Image (cartoon, rainbow, N blue to C red):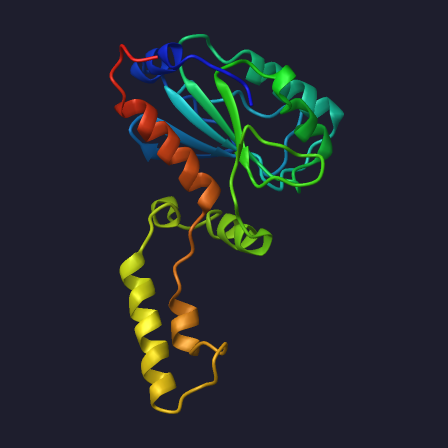
Amino acid sequence: MKSFSLRPVLLALAVAGPLVAGPDDVRDLGESLVYVRMERVTAESAALPAAPSLVLDLRYAAGEDAAAAALQAKLRGNPAGRRLLLVLANPETAAPLRRILEPAHLPARVLVLGRAGENFEPDIPVDFDAEAERTAWAAGGTGDLTELITDNPGKIRLDEAAIVRRHQNGGPEDGEPPAAAAAGTPVTDRVLQRAVQLHRGLNALPSGRN
């Protein structure tokens, strides 16, 4: 895992910059954190937004060598002292893109989070079932990202209570969840959630702490 000082990171979180709109999926996560989703990286992809802090979602992204080289230049150009850049990736991210996410190729303020796998070891591994991640990522394409990063234990407890009641009343056998409960189970994007939590945790630290 790359070592990095929290002081420049905290300085980065304190400095705002203009948001440059581009053709990619760009959304505001609050607290000066911007989310960018790239499903296909090309050499002509837009420049990264000049936001104070940024989440770049490259999970399942396609991209050839030329596109990876162009993106690498953008990551290396991450302005010193301006922001924290959190890159989300997984084993299904195109191989040329995964290669540029190796620690030796990235500045200290760029951290990679994601589900680890063969030929992919992120700085911060997140335990996430592959199928569940695909479902959460797909939901994030058009859905509300806030719902994907917010745990809803109350809903889970209600579903569990419904399963117990149905079992006591001669309902479906164990291991066969009621359709309504299964349909109502909230989807959580654990990788995006971890990135947001990391940003908020660093943002909450006193500026003088390393």
Residue 114 sits in quarter = top right
Tell me which corner region of the image, top left, top right, bottom left or bottom right, holds residue 206. Answer: top left
Q: Residue furthest right?
A: 65
The residue shown at (67%, 30%) is 98
Question: Up-down: is 19 above or below 27?
Answer: above
Q: Residue at x 45, y 86 (%)?
A: 172
From the top left corner, tell me how far across and down residue 55 is, in percent.
Answer: 45, 30
Q: Can see residue 47?
A: yes
Q: Position of residue 138 (x, y in %)?
A: 52, 51
10, 50: nearer the viewer: 10
Residue at left offset 39%, top offset 10%: 8
Q: Position of residue 181 (x, y in %)?
A: 39, 72
Q: Quadrant of the N terminus?
A: top right
Is 150 drawn above or below residue 116 in the view shown? Answer: below
Taking the image as shown, residue 37 lies to the left or right of residue 54, namely right
Looking at the image, which residue sits at the far top? Answer: 80
Image-based side of 168 in relation to 36, left or right: left
How many marks the image carries: the answer is 0
Residue 36: percent from the left, percent from the top?
48, 32
Q: Is residue 17 visible?
A: no
Q: Is residue 21 above or below residue 108?
A: below
Image quadrant occupied by the C terminus: top left
